[in-house]
Amino acid sequence: MSVSPPETTDPFRAAKDCMAGTVGGILQVFSGQPFDTVKVRLQTMPRPAPGQPPLYQGTLDCVRQTYRAEGLAGFYKGTTTPLVGVGLCVSIQFLVLEHMKRTFAQHNAASTTPAPLSLTQLYVAGATAGVANSVVSGPVEHIRTRLQVQTGSAASTGTGGSARPFYNGPIDCVRQIYRSHGLPGLFKGQAATIVREFQGYGAYFLAYEYMIQRTMARRQVARDQIAATEVCLYGALAGYAMWGSVYPVDVIKSKLQTDSLVPHQRQYHSVLDCARKTFRSEGVAGFYKGIVPCLLRAAPANAATFIGFELAMRFLK
């Protein structure tokens, strides 16, 4: 199946893409952060010692323990970072996606056999948007992940018996990591992030655009005439397409980003080393830890992302 090219005549289209993407990103954070916190804690919980129970017995047990120890605030740990960072990330995603779609449309129009955008072109556009996004999403998710796995209201500093969080929020986390490990420390797990973003967003935007364009062609309607409920449904399904194709990579990314920043104390030394050790100790199931909250998050978070983007674009039109 092929799809029709996007409009290329609006000189302010890039700015509108950016602003609408920011709206979608902010809605994504508020709707998805609690699920993401539970997902990351399940992904990164240590393997129990022989004869000992795991830290969390499952998704509901993680929710119960988090709420009991930290209240509702525990589910929103690290929210400041993604609120700013994810807003920027989603803005970048849509900015690059729409730019790539326009570039492909112009290329197709100039060829000897003009054709609308193909599914391959949409996949490449989405994958390119994902790679561009990884420059920001890598350090943003690294900081968020470290804050999310800080359990309890405080942690021992290891000196003097005083108790306080190891990181007193995202700014303190960035400051400590940068002071000790520089920029490479902030970009820990970046290789896994790039792989996840390339495949994940390729599948994500391909699935969404396929459903949107199919609806437009079948009903002979404009994009802004598609009902909000359908946009939400397509966004939710696109979220499942993304996570279904990259979840094991996301597990590896989370493990690398919560591993020690000190080289000789690291449990994992590379993406492949992490994959090998995870498989050796936990089998295939180890690559799917935390998938239940991830799938629960996929529908509301991605529905919110796309309805935010589409409605903002309709308003800005």
Image (cartoon, rainbow, N blue to C red):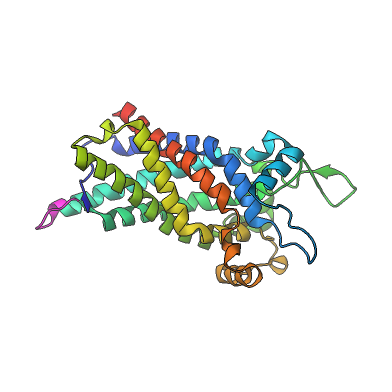
Where residue 75 appears, as percent x and y from the top left, is 65, 39
Can residue 7 be seen? no
Where, by quadrant of the figure, is residue 217 drawn? top left
- Pick the quarter of the image with the N terminus: bottom left
The answer to whether residue 311 is left or right of residue 288 is left
The answer to whether residue 95 is left or right of residue 283 is left
Magenta stretch, main secondary structure class: loop
Instruction: Give, as a single range, the part of the protein colored magenta.
Output: 109-116
The answer to whether residue 252 is left or right of residue 260 is left
Residue located at (63% from left, 73% from top): 280
Residue located at (87% from left, 44% from top): 162
Residue located at (79% from left, 61% from top): 52
- Pick the quarter of the image with the C terminus: top left
Of 121 and 80, which appears nearest the observer? 121
Q: Is residue 69 above or below residue 181?
A: above
Where residue 29 appears, as percent x and y from the top left, is 53, 38
